[in-house]
Image (tube, rainbow, N blue to C red):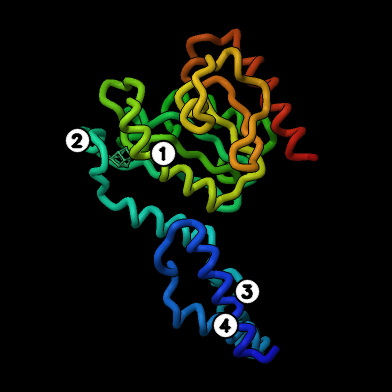
Amino acid sequence: MNNKTEIVEELKKAMEFYQELGFKYLPVKIEQKFIILEARKRGSAEVEKRESENGRGMTSELPDFRTSALKSLRDEIGDCQRCKLCKNRKNIVFGEGQAEAKIMFIGEGPGRDEDIQARPFVGEAGKLLTSLIIKLGLKREEVYIANIVKCRPPNNREPEEDEIIMCRPFVERQIEIIKPKVIVSLGKVATHALLKVKTPISKIRGNFFDYRGIPLMPTFHPAYLLRNKKDKWLTWDDMQKVLEKLKN
Ligand code: SF4
């Protein structure tokens, strides 16, 4: 194949990738993508020149598909008014972490601290989740953390069915983009929303389920564990299974 054909093939693959995720346009400027691909194919004179000028590899400047796709999804959510949770929120809490994370933690929705900081799991329950992640030998930045609904339900009530239905497509798209090796659903709401079951979390936790080809481990929500410390070991047990799954 000549260079032009290869470039066209690469662009086609990229467009198909985004189309499957539901995007109607590429989240990078086409000229930018074209220039980068051309430079890549041409080989390295320019790359080396830029590397020596910048003191870092040009690869670090290449648009990362997953990061770009997440950014585009965030742009698409915009100042979302799709459900009634928009009325009292301060911020939309999109989610954060590594776009290529192997583990994705999914909770139910932002609380007060998360709403203020626009970051997931930063309150007391978040601290517990972070310490759990560290005990697993990981860094918080290495995983991805998101919620089923992106806006805080008033008085920290559970998200209602209509709110979940409106917001769930966003977390589904995040999962499609990140393609984690394992999903950990935190608590009843997240587990029920993703698996579309109604089984109590105490009965369903600790076993892997299939979420569109990805193993999903339901476990207790950290906020529950703050109130029921004796059950922390059960979650620890669930996480050992997650680590085992990752090793395999
Ligand atoms: S919870 Fe989701 S659907 Fe509802 S307003 Fe917020 S972002 Fe939009």
Residue 54 horizontal/vertical position (percent): 56, 78
- Which residue is the site of mark 1? 168
Q: Earlier in the sequence, mark 3 or mark 1?
A: 3
Which label is found at residue 85?
Answer: none
Looking at the rendered structure, the secondary structure element under dot 1 is helix
- Which residue is the site of mark 3? 57
Q: Residues within 10 Å of mark 3 (few under 14, many from 20)?
A: some
User: Which amino acid lies under the numbered mark 4 shown in the image of this protein?
Assistant: Val
Query: Does residue 19 sit above or below 137 in this rendering?
Result: below
Residue at the spot x=25%, y=49% of the render? Answer: 79
Q: Are marks 3 and 4 in contact (CB under 8 Å)?
A: no
User: Which amino acid lies under the numbered mark 1 shown in the image of this protein?
Assistant: Arg
Q: Are marks 2 and 4 in contact (CB under 8 Å)?
A: no
Can residue 178 be seen in the rendering of this structure? yes
Q: Earlier in the sequence, mark 2 or mark 1?
A: 2
- Which residue is the site of mark 2? 87
Which mark's residue is nearer the viewer, 2 or 4? 4
Looking at the rendered structure, the secondary structure element under dot 3 is loop
In whole angstroms, how far apart are the C-alphas of marks 3 and 4? 24 Å
Q: Quadrant of residue 160?
A: top left
Q: Earlier in the sequence, mark 2 or mark 4?
A: 4
